[in-house]
Image (cartoon, grey):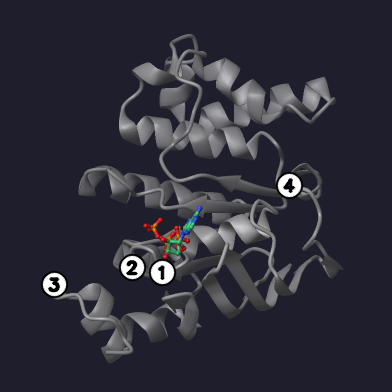
Amino acid sequence: MLELRGVNVFYGAVQALREVSLRVDEGEIVTLIGANGAGKSTTLMAISGIVPPRRGEILFEGRPIHGLAPDRIVRLGLCQVPEGRRIFPELTVAENLDMGAFLRRDRQGIERDREELYELFPILHQRRHQPGGNLSGGEQQMLAISRALMARPRLIMLDEPSMGLAPIIVKGIFEEIRKLRDAGNTILLVEQNARAALRIADRGYVIETGQMVLEGTSEELLNNNDVQRAYLGKDYKSISD
Ligand code: ATP
């Protein structure tokens, strides 16, 4: 469904991605794990058209999308949930969801999707008339994900949904993400929390200083000595060390 081939991204003279290649098939959760500053968010921003690649190709359902404007990419069905749960704190939960459907005109479909999300996340239904800013961190993350789903994306990209959340809340969020995949969604999940991400993902990639260093099924990565030492243990050391 999505393929990156030899993507290079620069911020001015600084190269943030080097020959990055990855693939996401329909119905999968694919996770991209790596440390702070490894290039995870940049990968998502390159796909979304926010920082276009200087070299390389990005194909979505067989069609090149590198060079398209971000709004065109969203219209094709690629939606990103940014790091840090950027919901609209002053708007109600229901209004936040409506913002996700901004590009849609099918009123009945919008209502149906909103009801489905309320069924999936009953807390959002209970709080639908309250300002988004009143929700807890975990609830805001669910709202941010739900808002993106209101756009009916073909593929959803999540940037560190576990960030700043307590472990017990992270567990709940990851269970919900797994449910979304089981309901037929395709998900690219960027995470520093490698263990939680690999537990729900089908496949994964490891990125270090802008380069892919490993890829495999989640089971292969969870059992890989280098991954265990670098990302699943207590002491951090990069794989290339
Ligand atoms: P984090 O988990 O901290 O968000 P990340 O893996 O998502 O890390 P990126 O945010 O993609 O990493 O950053 C990759 C590299 O690009 C880093 O070295 C970072 O300092 C650099 N970088 C990111 N944004 C910019 C920018 N706007 N201008 C210059 N350099 C940037």
The span from disc 4 to disc 1 (Cα, nearest Å) is 23 Å
Left or right of 203 on screen, residue 36: left
Q: Which residue is mark 2?
A: 35
Give how far across and how far down residue 152 sits, in percent.
71, 41
Q: Residues within 10 Å of mark 1 (few under 14, many from 20)?
A: many
Q: Earlier in the sequence, mark 4 or mark 3?
A: 4
Secondary structure, mark 2, is loop
Residue 234: which disc?
Answer: 3
Residue 189, above or below 222: above
Secondary structure, mark 4, is helix
Q: Which residue is mark 1?
A: 38
Q: Residue at x 48, y 20 (%)?
A: 125
Ligand 1 placement by image quarter: bottom left
Give how far across and how far down residue 147 sits, in percent.
58, 32
Asked if one can make out residue 187 in the rendered structure from this viewpoint, the answer is: no
The quarter of the displayed image where residue 64 is located: bottom right
Give how far across and how far down residue 68 sits, in percent.
81, 54
